Amino acid sequence: MAMTYVQKLLARACDKDSVATGDILELPVHLAMSHENAALVINQFNEIYRGTGREPKVWDPDRIAIIFDHRVPAESAKTATNHKKTRGFVQQQGISKFHDVRGDVGGICHQILPENGYVRPGQVLVGTDSHTTTHGALGAFAFGIGATEMAAVWALGSILNVEVPGTIKVVVNGQLPEGVYAKDLILHVIGTLSAEGANFKVIEFHGETISNLPTSGRLVLCNMSVEAGATAGVVPPDEETVRYLRDEAGVEGELELLAADTDADYDRVVEIDAAQLGPQIACPHTVDNVKPIDGIKGKKINQIVVGSCTNGRLDDIEIVARTLRGKHVAEGTRLLVFPASWRIYTDAMDAGYLGDLIKAGAVVCNPGCGPCLGIHQGALGDDEVALATTNRNFKGRMGNPGAEVFLCSPAVAAASALSGVITDPREVN
Amino acid sequence: MSTGKVVLKLANDISTDIIYPGRFMATVLPTETPQFAFADDKAFNQLLNEGGVPAGSFIVAGDNFGCGSSREQAASCIKGYNITVVARNFARIFLQNSINVGLQMIICPDINAAEGDELEVRENKVWNLASGESFDIEPLPAARQAIIDAGGLIPYTRKLMLERAGQAL
């Protein structure tokens, strides 16, 4: 029977010849990731063992990754205590893939996993974070789960009752025009599918535009697939996947590169001509409220945020640094830059990008989730407007229900930082 | 079966940031999360905290309830008040979290009700006693229902873990 990429991956993972949409599977887990919410996972994990007379013991300490990123360094005594409790658990259980608040190994979980070679094609990867979909960019079946579900994974080593999802095939051909990036493409896809258009489904990306897109861009596409409700986003692995894993993530050994059958059955096929795309903006207060930039140009912006698990990578920071070099952020606008990991931070420092940004008036913060979800830094004032390269613009998202968040690419963020209003990067030298 | 009033009527795409704003995420325990339920809706949050919402009440929502973050606090904070959520459909992670922590939720694709309406759940339907209409409930897949029947994912996993270790509870 012809299968999609994810169907093939799932059949392989549970040692079956084939699986079909709707089948219920128990899947062995290759990697289980948590961040600060490990504190809740630990609580639920201990609950599972309560009254059994058994000592709580994770199934495989080398398959669990814990990364502090949401509130680093701790913003409150409560967070610091959660961090402390989690460190104790990590040590007690011997969890090896632990990334503490440190300048050598720290960063946002969805950057730490790829850049350390933890993600491989063909893996089943779960994380207690909805943007775990990011890792489909390297050919993993990666999806977000809740803390109690993760506690069960820690105990059993598998995830129970996973329904094989249907798949939406997004085929992108043509060359992205100057000033238009992966972020514009995924915003366009979300606007087309709607916020629930891919609920309980996988988005599989195909086409020459995707083949030509570096992993950094593929991570953006898969990261935001969840904003259309998708269980997972995935780019079937190819030469670029192997290049990234070997050259940038230091992965050695054999890689399993499955492919979708050409006659696989898809729930829906969406074809996009990349050459026709312009910069896109997701307007308040839903991510699917996507509009071409033309109608929104000139909107006054109080705060610009560049960073997050979506767009805080080196090529994103490079775009902003090149645009701002020798110039200044507009008066009345704040520019905050959060590199996605300390590796990216130091690379950007060595390349001179951080100096360019700071001299232009940007505030370069430490890697972490920062203002994206309104829990740490960079909160918005009443009636303020933010423009961000992050992934969500829900009411209250940046800590203030009385503020507005618009989402865009790093190029739009950079052009807008110079003018203080939403600006089309194609109109800036 | 259960009867109660609709205490909150919500639109489509209600995100977990609305249900449980991110700034309260350092609070994780199910016993502590209810105080921050719908914190940015000050009037409703106050009503909840003052004990003004009886157990068995309903929240009625449109499509894609619980979209966004995987934060389980969004399910546990509502469960703390023994409120049932009736929505046209739910976002995947929220649905799974609700099942896992035992939040009562009902998928009801045609639900039509206003704040203050009395609802009754019986015979696989939601009855709006104010309008006299009834709406079919979409059953959960058997694999998910089994977790609810076990009392949530913790007891379900405990039993499974012991079975696999060859030990009876």
Image (cartoon, coloured by chain):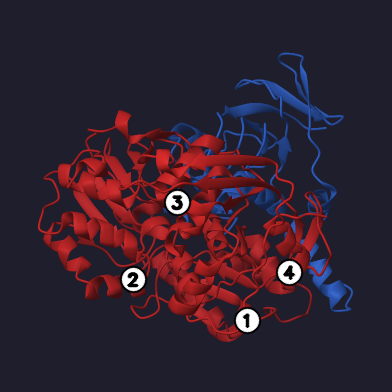
Chain colours: A red, B blue
Q: Are marks 1 and 4 on the same chain?
A: yes
Looking at the image, residue A316 sits to the left or right of residue A36; the answer is left
Distance between mark 4 and mark 2 Cα atoms: 33 Å
Is disc 2 surrounded by few (<14), some (14 to 19) or many (20+) residues within 10 Å? many
What kind of residue is marked 4?
A: Ser
Tell us which disc is closer to us: 3 or 2: 2
Looking at the image, residue A376 sits to the left or right of residue B77; the answer is left
Tell us which disc is closer to us: 1 or 4: 1
Distance between mark 3 and mark 2 Cα atoms: 26 Å
Q: Are marks 2 and 1 on the same chain?
A: yes
Disc 3 target residue: B22
Mark 4 chain: A
Distance between mark 4 and mark 3 Cα atoms: 29 Å
What kind of residue is marked 3?
A: Gly
Q: Are marks 1 and 3 on the same chain?
A: no
Q: Secondary structure at mark 3?
A: helix
**Which numbered disc covers residue A254?**
1
